[in-house]
């Protein structure tokens, strides 16, 4: 029997949330009032890393390990989600669904399977690498808040080829059991916080867009580098990536992603204790560079194994009936 995971470092997480959110607000201000291009670029790059600290804390809250107290955990998650920007419940539905779907057909963006649309596959893949994956979050949140019927269109739901290959139907199905009132109130809170930042800091569109554009590139790259070409298993399908200690610290051990999928209730502070440092640990930069070459053809041996497994399930079903 496995021992229970360590408790969340509540006080440390609250301090990190306070300092990091003050930092990203300051960087947004600096980018919006930059005296020259170099200051603007420097502020945007720094924002792209520090806002990932806030996202990593949001990730902790989604798993219920930001704070020991559940109410504090959830309100902390709502505050942190506003800096993404997304809604806390919205992120929880999407991310916990990812843990269930990980490396399934709905999330095999790194492989071109027989029958896949190559155009859609490459659009998805390079959308990941160029930050469009981040942009989908705020756009989907706004659609859910203002035009929810769009998310029920046949193009995105059901068994049509686009919905299945893009994973849209799998992701959106999780919202059927969510409380729409709570989700929409949280999204309104996110809009209020972002609007407050614009008003208090006198932000400019250029400064805001530069910061969030840099964050989109940084965040989107990691979100699939830690899964690309890993085993096709929901629990084992991730990597513990090698990266500089400074970057790993800013991302709160997010690069120990295989350990996280194996032990999703272990807080970030203790995640290294669950990493097998003797096992394969690809370099983040190595995986990221390979990603720019595009998705790979689905391996023939994996396809044969899938077909054999499906045949065995059908035979077992026929025998039982």
Image (tube, rainbow, N blue to C red):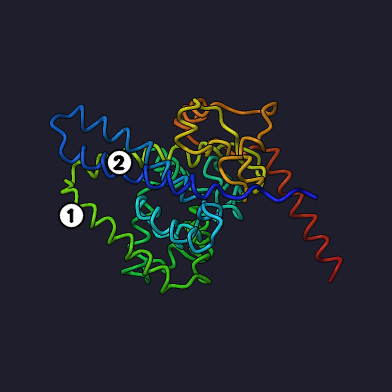
Residue 178 lies left or right of residue 192; in this view the side is right
Q: Nearer the viewer, residue 290 or 93?
A: 93
Residue 112 percent across, percent down from the top left: 54, 42
For marks 2 and 1, give the CA distance. Answer: 20 Å
Residue drawn at the location 32% of the way across and 38% of the way down: 47
Query: Residue placed farthest to the left in the image?
Result: 35
Question: Which is more N-terminal, label 1 or label 2?
Answer: 1
Query: Residue placed farthest to the front in the image?
Result: 11
Local SS, label 2: helix
Which residue lies under the disc numbered 2?
Answer: 213
Q: Which mark is residue 23?
A: none
Residue 187 percent across, percent down from the top left: 35, 64
Residue 153 lies left or right of residue 306; in this view the side is left
Tally of numbered discs: 2
Residue 304 lies left or right of residue 132; in this view the side is right
Residue 55 percent across, percent down from the top left: 43, 46
Local SS, label 1: helix
């Amino acid at each position: 029997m496995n021992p229970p995971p360590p408790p969340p470092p509540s006080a440390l997480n609250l301090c990190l949330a306070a300092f990091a959110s003050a930092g990203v607000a300051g960087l947004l201000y600096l980018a919006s009032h930059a005296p020259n291009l170099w200051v603007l670029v420097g502020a945007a790059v720094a924002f792209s890393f520090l806002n990932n600290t806030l996202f990593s804390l949001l990730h902790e809250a989604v798993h219920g390990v930001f704070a020991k107290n559940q109410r504090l955990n959830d309100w902390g998650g709502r505050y942190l989600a506003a800096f993404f920007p997304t809604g806390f419940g919205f992120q929880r539905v999407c991310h916990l669904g990812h843990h269930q779907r990980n490396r399934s057909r709905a999330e095999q963006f790194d492989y071109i399977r027989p029958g896949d649309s190559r155009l859609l596959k490459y659009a998805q893949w390079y959308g990941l690498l160029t930050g469009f994956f981040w942009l989908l979050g705020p756009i989907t949140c706004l659609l859910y808040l203002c035009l929810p019927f769009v998310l029920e269109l046949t193009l995105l739901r059901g068994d049509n080829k686009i919905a299945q290959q893009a994973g849209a139907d799998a992701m959106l199905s999780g919202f059927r059991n969510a409380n729409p009132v709570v989700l929409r109130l949280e999204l309104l809170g996110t809009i209020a916080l972002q609007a407050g930042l614009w008003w208090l800091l006198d932000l400019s569109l250029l400064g805001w867009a530069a910061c969030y554009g840099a964050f989109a590139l940084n965040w989107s790259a990691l979100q699939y580098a830690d899964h690309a070409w890993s085993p096709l298993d929901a629990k084992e399908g991730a990597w513990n990536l090698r990266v500089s200690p400074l970057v790993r610290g800013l991302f709160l051990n997010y690069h120990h992603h295989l350990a996280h999928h194996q032990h999703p209730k272990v807080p970030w502070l203790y995640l290294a204790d669950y990493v097998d440092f003797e096992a394969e640990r690809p370099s983040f930069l190595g995986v990221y560079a390979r990603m720019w070459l595009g998705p790979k053809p689905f391996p023939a041996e994996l396809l044969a194994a899938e077909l054999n497994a499906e045949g065995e399930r059908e035979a077992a079903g026929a025998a039982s009936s």
